[in-house]
């Protein structure tokens, strides 16, 4: 049994001591799978009343290896800081996600991605529940195409 998930699911999947292994997404149609990858970031609003203080905080506090490691420890997602990503890859679960991301493509930064994930998750639940994988997946693809126009 398997599921297609990302680093956000680590805590839930391992909470009850479940033995989890992370593998790259298998090939589809003979082509190398290219999972979506993304990063979390901080933005400084042009409307900020304290732009100088905010910039100081972002560049001299958050943009340090120590702060990036603290963020990782609070929520173990793959750090964008390359050296830290390499360091935490010694954890086999994180290492699996890092390896899988090597073939990844940037996730589109569009509001329609909410519809994509809703439809994708519903299709996964149906397939896990016994629905025909091919017809369920094809219907999900058609629904996604209709949703994002």
Image (spheres, helix red, strand yellow):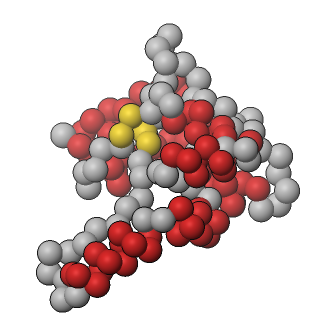
**Residue 91: percent from the left, percent from the top?**
73, 47
Which residue is at the far left?
Answer: 47
> At 22% across and 87% down in the image, what residue appears?
50
Residue 149 vs residue 14: left or right?
left
| Count of numbered circles on the image | 0
Q: Is residue 104 above or below residue 8?
A: above
Place residue 16 in its image quadrant. Answer: bottom right
**Residue 136: percent from the left, percent from the top?**
48, 32
Look at the image and tell me whether residue 17 can be seen.
yes
**Residue 100: percent from the left, percent from the top?**
57, 33
> At 58% across and 39% down in the image, what residue appears?
98
- Closer to the camera in the image, 16 or 32: 32
**Residue 140: percent from the left, percent from the top?**
41, 36
Look at the image and tell me whether residue 140 can be seen.
no
Place residue 106 in its image quadrant. Answer: top left
> At 48% across and 28% down in the image, what residue appears?
103
- Closer to the camera in the image, 44 or 75: 44
- Closer to the camera in the image, 6 or 81: 81
Residue 74 vs residue 108: left or right?
right
> At 53% across and 69% down in the image, what residue appears?
67
Residue 35 vs residue 99: left or right?
left
User: Can you say which quadrant of the picture contains the N terminus?
Assistant: top right
User: Can you say which quadrant of the picture contains the C terminus?
Assistant: top left
Q: Is residue 16 above or below residue 93?
A: below
């Amino acid at each position: 049994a398997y599921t297609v998930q990302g680093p956000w699911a680590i805590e839930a999947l391992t909470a009850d001591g479940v033995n989890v292994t992370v593998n790259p997404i298998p090939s589809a149609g003979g082509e190398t799978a290219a999972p979506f990858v993304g990063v979390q970031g901080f933005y400084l609003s042009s409307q900020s009343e304290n732009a100088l203080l905010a910039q100081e905080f972002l560049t001299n506090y958050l943009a340090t290896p120590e702060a990036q490691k603290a963020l990782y420890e609070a929520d173990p997602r793959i750090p964008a800081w390359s050296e830290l990503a390499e360091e935490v890859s010694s954890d086999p679960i994180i290492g699996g996600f890092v390896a899988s991301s090597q073939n990844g493509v940037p996730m589109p930064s569009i509001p329609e991605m909410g519809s994509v994930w809703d439809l994708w998750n519903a299709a996964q639940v149906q397939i896990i529940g016994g629905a025909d994988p091919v017809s369920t997946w094809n219907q999900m693809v058609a629904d996604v195409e209709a949703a994002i126009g």
